[in-house]
Image (cartoon, rainbow, N blue to C red):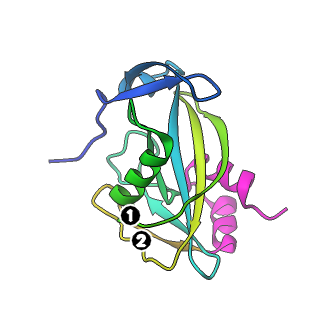
Amino acid sequence: MTASDNLTERLPIVDTEGRVTGSATRGKCHGGSMWLHPVVHLHVFDMHGRIYLQKRPDWKEIQPGKWDTAVGGHVDYGEDIVSALRREAREELGLTDICPEFVTRYIFESDRERELVYAYRVTTDLTPRPTEELAGGRFWTFAEIEDAIATGNILTPNFIEEYRRLFAPD
């Protein structure tokens, strides 16, 4: 059996300040409705300053097979942001007992969805262990990321935008 995204999962619909105004299915949120829904991102750094990226599985609905932020996921309806972040870190990379630091909140918009992104970062000596939700992962240097941006289409547009916003050298 091939895994797939749960398009009937209920997500909160929020205003630009993150206040819940309703709910909708994942399928509706990703189907061009442009309803703003919250997501969490966690950038994981090692003690050498390298950043961990996850490889999205080929079965993902959006950006299959591309490299992306270490941890990323939807906030469930009724769930708070930090709980969602901790759940996703555990579910995707097996990371627990971390102390993430809030970096920023912003709106990401593609041709089919709008997300209110809550971005966090953590530096750790723990080894991420990608679960079956991912197709793998590894630590990257900033030089490798810059090369990947310049030479190919292997990184998600969302990661590239967030990387440039938060970490790219001037």
Q: Earlier in the sequence, mark 2 or mark 1?
A: 1
Residue 130 horizontal side relative to residue 121, left or right: left
Please give the name of the residue rendered at 49% of the width and 47% of the height, measured from the top-left corner.
82
Residue 138: image x %, image y %? 47, 72
**Which mark, residue 102?**
none
Secondary structure found at label 1? helix
Residue 19 horizontal side relative to residue 78, left or right: right
Which quarter shows the C terminus? bottom right
Disc 2 to disc 1: CB gap under 8 Å: yes
Residue that badge 2 annotates: 128
Magenta stretch: dominant secondary structure? helix
Residue 84: image x %, image y %? 43, 45
Residue 118: image x %, image y %? 58, 44
Secondary structure found at label 2? loop
Quadrant in the picture for residue 122? bottom right
Residue 162: image x %, image y %? 66, 50
Residue 134 in sight from this viewpoint? no
The residue nearer to you, when weighing 9 against 87, is 87
Q: Is residue 163 magenta?
A: yes
Q: Which stretch appears magenta?
A: 141-170
Q: Is residue 127 above or below residue 99?
A: below
Name, please, the residue furthest toward the right.
Answer: 170
Amino acid type indicated by mark 1? Leu
Circle 1 crowding by C-alpha within 10 Å: few under 14, some 14–19, many from 20? many
Q: Is residue 61 above or below residue 34?
A: below
Please give the name of the residue rendered at 69% of the width and 65% of the height, measured from the top-left corner.
146
**Which mark, residue 93?**
1
Please give the name of the residue rendered at 23% of the width and 46% of the height, measured from the top-left corner.
3
